[in-house]
Image (cartoon, helix red, strand yellow):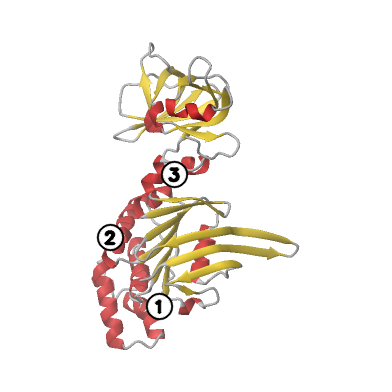
Amino acid sequence: MASVQLEGVQKIYDAGSRAHIAVHNIDLQIDDGELVVLVGPSGCGKTTTLRMIAGLESVTRGTLRIGGRVVNDVPPKDRDIAMVFQNYALYPHMTVRENMGFALTLRHVGRTEVDARVRDAATILGIEDLLDRRPRQLSGGQRQRVALGRAIVRHPQVFLFDEPLSNLDAKLRVQMRREIARLHRQLSATMVYVTHDQVEAMTLGNRIVVMNTGRVQQVGAPLELYERPDNAFVATFIGSPPMNLVPARLTRDGGLRVVADDGAFAVPAPQAWAGLLIGGAERRILFGIRPEHLRIDGPGASAGVAARLDLVEPMGAELYLSLRAGNHDLMARVPPQPLPPVGTEIVLGMDVAHAHCFDADTSVRLS
């Protein structure tokens, strides 16, 4: 296996007089044997970045290395990578065995070696009994396993995954996530995985690269991104349901407090935030709090937040509550419990020890 390095990598599409920068100056080190997930909304540049690593898109500026070798001008077939696509891209007239071994056959690998590699990959993926079937005889999950097997038999330096589970149903996606995680542990392979699904990113990646508008927003381990997002975009993109963000003021008036911009609530601020007011009596912020750090309090609770209950979503072991406090929509995640009717006003408590503070203008983390 091999490491992957991107140094100041850019992708610029030139459309006549107007140039579009799809990827801005990415610096990223992916270590040998690491599974790194590129995640972000549609159009954020994650697939373009993956395709540059694969050689399917040219690098406009910067340097791209695989295994220490500069590959900017190396054709895809000579990069020693294997790519698994969103659509399985299997040849319908070939059997599973023939599909898995086709790339090796093109490289004139001996028949005995091809058969051995195909059997080994099929054993890893649990599809030994499917080798003589054709793609039309397979389910979606089985086809995806065949696509994985086709990549495994090549023994590449790097595996590249481009949203490989998007076409599967929810239950099968969970199963295939486990398969890919197990495969990574078993092969100790370098893998780069692209998805728009933050649940996939959180459950699969050793590290996650969060992207937006062609730029890297933050790189880190899953829990690091969840607990200490660098900016408001990462805070709301990572986590399901996402973090609640409320425009507010941090003020010393009446003690160190956070006051919503419309006055809908005022709650005590963590004392550690006092240093953010050096040189001023108050500061405009974005106040962030995760849904699990909201709770339902009794009517007489101190520092409670009055909110209207708009929707209850039972999720089995917990409830998702959609709430309205002043002009702000909030989401709470609470244990199952008796609730008043929808439309009723309730009192919310906030665990402000777990709150987050972002700059109102730049959205950069302050706390």
The span from disc 3 to disc 2 (Cα, nearest Å) is 23 Å
Q: Secondary structure at mark 2?
A: helix
Q: Amino acid at mark 3?
A: Ile
Task: Give the left or right position of residue 296, taking residue 217 as reference.
Answer: left
Residue visible at 30% across and 24% down? 337
Q: Earlier in the sequence, mark 3 or mark 1?
A: 1
- From the image, tell me which residue sits under label 2: 182
Q: Where in the figure is residue 202, as x and y percent of width and height?
A: 38, 49
Rendered position, 229 above or below 71: above
Rendered position, 299 above or below 123: above
Q: Few, some or many C-alpha atoms within 10 Å of disc 3 (few <14, some 14-19, many ≥20)?
A: many
Marks 1 and 2 in Cβ contact (< 8 Å): no
In depth, the one of 217 and 83 nearer the eye is 217
Task: Give the left or right position of residue 76, taking residue 297 as reference.
Answer: right
Rendered position, 356 above or below 107: above
The span from disc 3 to disc 1 (Cα, nearest Å) is 42 Å
Residue visible at 51% across and 28% down? 329
Image quadrant holding the N terminus, namely bottom left
The span from disc 1 to disc 2 (Cα, nearest Å) is 30 Å
Residue visible at 28% across and 72% down? 121
The numbered disc on residue 93 is 1
Q: Few, some or many C-alpha atoms within 10 Å of disc 1 (few <14, some 14-19, many ≥20)?
A: few
Q: Where in the figure is residue 117, as x and y percent of width and height?
A: 28, 78
Q: Earlier in the sequence, mark 3 or mark 2?
A: 2
- From the image, tell me which residue sits under label 3: 238
Q: Amino acid at mark 1?
A: His
Identify the residue at the far right of this view.
17
Q: Amino acid at mark 2?
A: Arg
Q: Where in the figure is residue 18, as x and y percent of width and height?
A: 73, 60
Taking the image as drawn, is residue 313 in sight?
no
In depth, the one of 218 and 328 nearer the eye is 218
Taking the image as drawn, is residue 116 in sight?
yes
